[in-house]
Image (tube, rainbow, N blue to C red):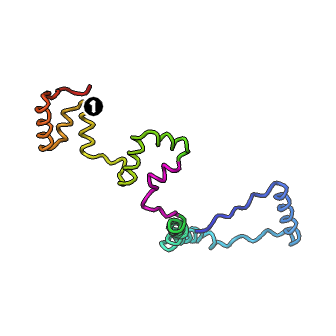
Amino acid sequence: MKFRQNTPPPDEAAEHELVASVRQLAAQKGGEEPPRPPVTYWQNLIARTNAGIDEASSPKAITLSWAARVAIPGVVAILSFLVGLRYFVPDHRGTGPSLQSVVMTLPQGALDSIQTDQSVSDRLADMADVGLDIFEVTKDDVTRYFVEEGQLSAAAASLDDQQVTEVLALLTSTGSEPRTGGPR
């Protein structure tokens, strides 16, 4: 495949100058007309044009064109991406900052308010010492939430047989009856 050449068209002054120079050269040669192409040129013009088209659309030409325009830039882009991933991505450590280090970065006023609220500071200390995950929800926490919200049927569904027996024993010993109903 041939690349297109970008040549600007000549302006009118340059064109008139070119026509004048061609006429001057023709006059110098004695006013003869330029020779015309031979008859064989016109007879095999279509055959030569078709041969040029076949050559430009041959498998070899198409393969080279595809390689130059698609395959090579694609391989270079993929390699650049992989090199970028290897050398320019920061290493992420598996562990994040500890709760204690996050709390210690708070301003002094916030630290004072956390330290004055005994329950908050106890919970933070317990979580920092034991290493509990704040967002981990246990089955007991879910059951306690359902009971506090008055969703007894959902709470009963989350209890196992031993826990149901304990709840019933506790209720019969205190003399209260279980409440039925949905949310408050």
Asked which secondary structure carries label 1, the reply is loop
Specify whether 20 is left or right of 40. right
Q: Residues within 10 Å of mark 1 (few under 14, many from 20)?
A: few
Give the side of residue 83 with respect to residue 146, left or right: right
* Residue designated by label 1: 149
Residue 85 placement (x, y as % from top left): 50, 65
Q: 142 or 42: nearer the eye?
A: 142
Instruction: From the top left corner, tell me how far across and down residue 133 is, in percent.
Output: 36, 51
41, 117: nearer the viewer: 117
**Foreground of the two, 53 or 58:** 58
The amino acid pointed to by label 1 is Glu
As displayed, is residue 78 above or below residue 173?
below
**Which quadrant of the structure image shows residue 11?**
bottom right
Residue for point 77% across, 70% down: 34
Magenta part of the protein: which range?
A: 89-105
Residue under the point 11% across and 33% down:
173
Residue at 24% across, 34% down: 147
* 95 lies above or below 165: below
Question: Residue 179 at what x, y percent from top left?
Answer: 17, 27
Q: Quadrant of the N terminus?
A: bottom right
Magenta-colored stretch includes residue 119: no
Q: Residue at x 82, y 54 (%)?
A: 12
Q: Position of residue 15 (x, y in %)?
A: 81, 58
Can residue 167 be seen here? The reply is yes
